[in-house]
Amino acid sequence: MHCSRCDAPAIVDQPYRGMHLCRAHFLASVEARARSEFHRQLPGFAGRTVAVAVSGGKDSAAALFLAHRYFARRPTVRVRAISVDEGIAGYRSNGLAAAARLAERLGVEHQIVRAEASLGTTTDRAAAELPGVVPCSFCGVWRRQLLNRTAREVGADALVLGFNLDDLAQTTLMNLVHGELDRLVRMAPHRVRQDGLVPRIAPLATVPEREVYLYVRLRELPFDHAECPHAGRASRNLFREIVWQLEEAQPGTRQALLTTRERLVAALLREEPAGAPTRCRACGEPAAGGLCRACEYLRLAVHDSAETAPGVS
Ligand code: SF4
Ligand SMILES: [Zn+2]
Ligand SMILES: [Zn+2]
């Protein structure tokens, strides 16, 4: 099979747009899609600091590399990397080492925020304390809060996340199926800027997961392949399977889900513009009301009835 753009042999098949691409055209196509998402999600960007959340996995490795490449043409913008160490034995330390290697190779400052020091607990310990709760529920909430807080503290104007097309299609479907329209509105990439929340952007939003994998392999970026030991209990696994089957049967489903989400969010915001978020009464971070979800989970996990969550101020 030849490339749809030149005579070289194709290395990737893109049934969702009827293309086959050679190595050079594939790399260029990922970079062009990321560039176009940076333009689209950060229109008229005049900020000075861009933070990239890096876990050490393939998606965030690609996001950091592409952000560094994109902003290299703008010397007034500083790109920096932030990792969260959730405290997951035998897993996270390898990812953090891979993230550190990539940051060093690119010459990007890399900061690691540890859940133990910032929250007073870890995902492993909370998972043991709360056997009835799927660990991703609190782990994801805590990570988002630590990333937002750290990005805000370093003066970041945007927080780049490694979400790929599959991730965003799965999250859209999950929120639709659960009827959680408010979460659909709050999902990255952000359309509305809210006080205290660093806007999260997703430059890989139109790149499928397997193409992100191929991209990091071809660019020889360091990343960790391991799967989190808690991942087996995530409800996302079911949606990953469903979205995959739908995409196989009807190429273009993932992109259609994202377009549906964008239209729905635009309609919802016309009907009811997003108000300013309230502040959590314990930690002061943005919250939907009363306690933020991070503090709710902390209360459960550390059996702490005090008003102020440990380490969160
Ligand atoms: S898979 Fe779940 S528990 Fe593991 S790091 Fe991700 S969110 Fe945390
Ligand atoms: Zn080609
Ligand atoms: Zn809180």
Image: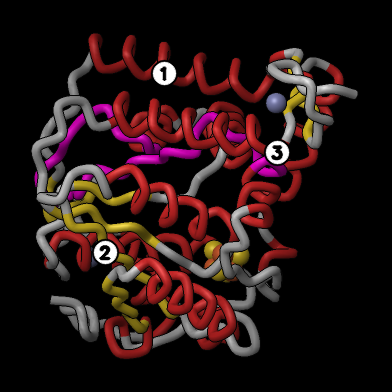
Q: Is residue 10 left or right of residue 57?
A: right
Q: Position of residue 305 (x, y in %)?
A: 27, 82
In the rendered structure, does residue 92 fall within the stretch colored magenta? Answer: no
- Quarter-of-image position of residue 156: bottom left
Secondary structure beneath label 2: strand
Give above or below for 86 relative to 15.
below
The answer to whether residue 207 is above or below residue 78 is above
Q: In which quarter of the image is the N terminus?
A: top right
At x 54% / y 85%, what residue is drawn?
93
Residue indicated by mark 1: 262
Q: Report the residue marked by disc 3.
A: 23
In front: label 1 or label 2: 2
Looking at the image, do the residues carrying marks 1 and 2 touch, with CB atoms under 8 Å apart?
no
Determine the quadrant in which ligand 1 lies: bottom right
Which amino acid lies under the numbered mark 1 shown in the image of this protein?
A: Glu
**CB of residue at label 3: within 8 Å of ligand 2?**
yes
Q: Is residue 222 above or below residue 123?
A: above
Q: Which mark is residue 80?
A: 2
**Mark in the foreground, 3 or 1:** 3
Label whose residue precedes the other's in the sequence (3 or 2)? 3
* Magenta-highlighted residues: 187-211
